Image: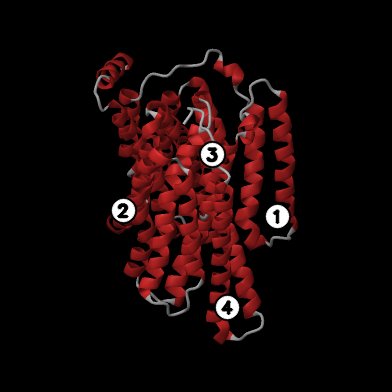
Amino acid sequence: MERLTASVQYKLSQLSYYRWLIFGAVSVGTFMSTMTSSIVNVALPTITAALNTDVQTVQWVVTAFLLMITSILPLAGRLGDLFGRRKVFGLGFIGFITGSALCSIAPSISALIGARLIQACGSAALMSNSFAIITDNFPKEERGRVLGTIGAVVAIGTMTGPALGGILLATLDWHAVFYVNIPLGLLGYLAARCILPPDHIQENGTKDIDYRGAFYFALMMCSFLVALNFGTKWGWLSYRIIGLFSLSAVFFKVFIWQEKRVQHPMLELALFFNKPFIMGNISGTLSFMALFSNIILLPFFLQDIQHMAPAQIGFIMSVYSLLMFAIAPLSGIISDKIGPYILTTTGLGIIAFGTYLCADLKSGAVFWDIVLAQAFIGIGNGLFQSPNNSSVMSAVEPSQMGVAGGINAVGRNLGMVCGTALGVAIFEHQRQAILAGANNSGSIAAFMTGYHDAMLAAAGYAVLALLVSLSRKGYVRVDGK
């Protein structure tokens, strides 16, 4: 088998479009990961009934997956740097296939959550090494273009998940939303083995893995993310939440101490003094905070206040993905010619404007006013994400690209969680404050107050990201461009 795949890879490597075959292999993993996230969300109500559980428990199907991915992303990237990205990327497909198969036969909610943890390990290996593989195999003058096209693949996966999930749930049952990953995963694994170039493995790599650092990082992230997820439910000033945040701070200090004392740390702390790298990651995290504050609250506004039909809600929710799909590749191509500065700052400004328009919506808002606000957010993200990812990955040495990709993915996930948690927290706090002094007739006003304030905060995240992004002007990439 090894000889056969090596022979196929060698023959493919002689083709003039070989690097685009590499892109295709990476795209399978990207599409599968993004599609799975959205398809599982659609199936949660059905899973709740089928496994005789409740909403508080079933949310761990999503939460546990997110916690595991975020906790091990840098480690997965480091393993790719040490043992070879092709190998770790291929193992990511195996982990994802195994987890999906176990999810599809899970007899209980606890078994399903456990299987999702295995699936998350595979997804982390795919996410942390995909950007590194692309950056390794494409010349610097094409990186923005190809990373922009990856952004389009993300948009396609996001759009496909809900639609495919609805069809599978209507024609089969909830198990089918996990079955679909198995043929996709097998295709991706074969593509990784037959297309991706051979790895240049670092000798004695096992001695260079900072397992303690990875453990401390995982504890730090788990404490922090659990506190964010349950802050609104348990109370932000409750002993449990304060304790979790304090525990996260303690493990952060222990993690930094560990990284300073070992010869080969999991994370090179020098990366955090690399200005374009860290500024790109911070602005990326803030952009996802703005985006997910909108994503978590918009469906409730459309359903509870606007009383829209599911088809209308689906159309509005797809506007962002459709425009990002159209804009991201173009933005990547332009960034290869003019650099990231103008596109990232312009994109973030448009995101801020779009979220401000959301904050200005009234109950009974015109349908196309809502669509316009979402269109601005989609255009802004399409302009921002590709140049920003190219900037981040071009700011590090080739030997650090795996861990850099892992950190980039951590920032993205943090933005999703923080945006969701803060959006809900602001919304609920303001809504409850209004309801406390009003009768039932004030419920719409209370909702709109909470929604407006949460979206104003989202616009603030985008403005802050813009200010951070401005600092990248005049930077010099590692590749000299």
Q: Are marks 3 and 1 in contact (CB under 8 Å)?
A: no
* Mark 1 nearby-residue class (10 Å; few <14, some 14–19, many ≥20): many
Kind of residue at badge 3: Gly
How far apart marks 4 and 2 lie (CA) works out to 35 Å
Residue 334 place in picture, x, y as percent = 37, 43
How far apart marks 4 and 1 lie (CA) works out to 26 Å
How far apart marks 3 and 2 lie (CA) works out to 45 Å
Residue under numbered circle 4: 446
**From what the image shows, is residue 472 above or below residue 162?**
above
Pick whichever, 172 or 33, lies toward us.
Answer: 33
How far apart marks 2 and 1 lie (CA) works out to 37 Å
Residue 440 occupies quadrant? bottom right
**From what the image shows, is residue 108 above or below residue 194?**
below
Earlier in the chain: of badge 3 and badge 2, it is 2
Residue under numbered circle 3: 474
Could you tell me which secondary element the residue under label 1 belongs to? helix
Residue 361: assigned label: none
Kind of residue at badge 2: Leu
